[in-house]
Structures are given as structure tokens and as C-alpha cells.
Image (cartoon, grey):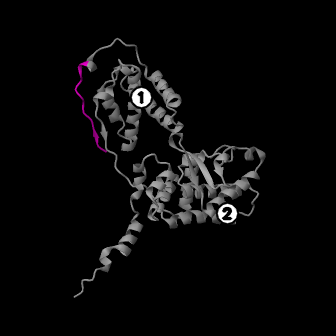
Amino acid sequence: MFLYYSLVQPTPIMMMKHPSPILHLATTTERFLFHCRYEKNLNEKTIKAYSTDLEQFKNYMNESLNIKDLRKIRPDSMKHYLKSLSEFQPKTIKRKMASVKAMLNFVEMEDESFYNPMRRLRIQIKVPFLLPDVMNADEVASLLRELYQEKKLCRRKEDYKYFEILRHIAIVELLFGTGLRVSELCSLSVTDVDLKSCFVKVYGKGSKERIVQICQPAILEALSEYREQFQKLPEKYSKNINFFVNRLNGGISPQSVRVLVKKLADKAGINKHITPHTFRHTFATLLLEEGVDIKYIQTILGHSSLSTTQIYTHVSSTRQKEILRDYHPRRNLDVSF
């Protein structure tokens, strides 16, 4: 990780002193989070990240620098805080500093007399570019094989265990079949999944709505079978508005899906770090390798910018080997005498 910062020379306006009231860190943070939730309508995941980052910032300023008033924060204070984050990954540091900057910019917009200490800092945090982990088609097949084998061996179809297996199959089929984010999958309601018209209605980042078609019979069958079994559960379960329901009659959590996927990968003997998001990466990469236009993939994934989707234009090492073996122009060159 490389950190770089420099100081911008103060202007006369910056150096002007204003007899202004105290800006308490705690109350200002609360006002900023209120602004994010009710005025900017940011999603809860973003607000939670802001809340966590700003709580850490507030605690550092209070406990390490004895600063409780935002007006007393100076560029040197920010440099000390930046150094305190060195234990985190560059990507995390960048996010935490961005959270603080967003709050300080908010205060500056509200109060012209506020001196924003970030204005005099030029911070560059170098985040290494890492290609996403992907599975090949055989690895996905091995995961599904484990689940379908478990279903076959389950004798008592009236037990909750059988329902749980069907739910796991539906989750994995849907992750791989649509490229949904785990948060999108967990927030699906019964009315969001239309099995007759073969689509799911998804609410992505920024509460943006999109429709993802389900065109593979195996995926539709998995979802339908899960739903049918769901209707056979006691009424307290069957009245639930969540599409994926846990044993406690609540919506299934992203963490539960992560645990499911990890256990499944271990059972299948896949020596990779497999997460629910790996299915999203795999879905996009395999579609690209089949020649699907990247703009269609962008729409399906719900990316607002094409540049985000372009990370998947890398070619997997296995596919690269096949291409260079079967299509390299050297294979047709005749240099014999």
C-alpha cells in the first residue's frame, strides 16, 4: 500500500477566523446520517458503512487527540488518523477516508464558516487491482451435484430438513443463474419472484429496480419445488413475505448464505475462496466467454457504469490456454523447406 499526501498552501480566506459555535462530532455525525437516510435516500448498507467508519473516526479524535469539536480538526489531525488505519487493507482505508470526507463536505455545505481540513490534503491511496475469483463450469456443476445428491438421499420429505435442502438448491441455482448480489437475493419477497412469467424483480444498489429473466428450466424447477414445499410448512412460515425463509421464520441473512456456500465448497473439494459473490463473477465471466455482448451483461448485473462490468473482460487462464492452443495463428504456419 502506498500513501501519499501533501499540504495545499492556505489562502487568506482559509486563514480567516470566525467566532462560530462548537460543532460536536457526535451530533454532527447524527445529522449527517439523517441527511444520508432521509434526504439522499441512500440504502441501509451504505448508511451502515458510514456509521461504522464515522464512529471509528469520532472515537479516534476523542480518545487519541482529545478533539470533540470538528472546528479543531486540522490537516495534521487527519494525517494522524490516516496513519492509525495502517492495519487495514488499502481498499478499506480508502473507504473510511471517503466516509469522513463526505461528512466534512456536508458540514462545509451547511456552514460556510467551517474550515474543512480535507481541503488542504491531497491523499492518494493505491489500491492494487485484483481480478475477481471465478469458478469454471465443472466446479459449479460439482457444487450443484453435492446438493442434488443430498436431496436424493433425504428419505423423509415431510421433514424440515428436506425443505432446507430445497432452499439451498434454489439459492445456489438462483445465484449462478442470475448473478444476483447476495443482498439482493436475501431481500427478495414472494411477490418479487414471478415463476409464471419467469423473472425476478430486483432492487439493487441505490434502490434501483431491474428485471432479471429466468430462462433455464432447471432453475425454474428448483425455485418452483422450493416454493411448493414452502407452502406445506406450518402457517406461521407460509404467511411470510420473504421468498427465502429461515428456521426462525425470518428472512435468510447474507451471512447464512456465505456459510452455506463455504460449507458446500468444502464438501465439493474446491480449493478456492468461494463466496456468494463468486457466483456473480462466474456468471458474468462465463457469459463473456460464450460471446455475450458486455452491454447485456451490464444490464443483467445492474451496473450503472460499463467500466464496472469491464473487469470481467479478463479471460480465465483455462480458457486462455484453450484459445492459444486452438486459435493461435502459429499453428497454421508452415516453415518446412
Residue 62 x/y as whole percent: 40, 24
The three-letter code of the residue at mark 2 reads Lys
Quarter of the picture containing the N terminus is top left
Residue under the image location 51 percent in, 27 percent down = 34
Q: Is residue 271 visible?
A: no
Q: Is residue 92 in view from this perspective? A: yes
Residue at the (40%, 54%) spot, across then down: 311
Q: Tell me what residue is drawn at x 27 percent, y 35 percent.
A: 5
- Closer-to-camera residue (161/230): 230
Between the residue at mark 1 and the residue at mark 2, the CA separation in whole angstroms equals 51 Å
Quarter placement of the C terminus: bottom left
**Residue topped by disc 1:** 103
The residue sitting at 40% across, 36% down in the picture is 96
Q: Which mark is residue 325?
A: none
Element at label 1: helix
Q: Which contiguous range is marked in magenta?
A: 1-12
**In x, y percent, where is residue 336?**
24, 86
Name the main secondary structure of what is drawn in magenta.
loop
**Kind of residue indicated by mark 1:** Met
Q: Nearer the viewer, residue 143 or 112?
A: 112
Say if mark 1 contacts mark 2, CB within 8 Å. Answer: no
Q: Nearer the viewer, residue 81 or 286?
A: 286
Q: Which residue is mark 2?
A: 151
Please say if 94 is above or below 101: below
Q: Is residue 6 one of those drawn in magenta? A: yes
157 in magenta: no
- Sequence-earlier tag: 1 or 2: 1
In front of the other: 152 or 44: 44
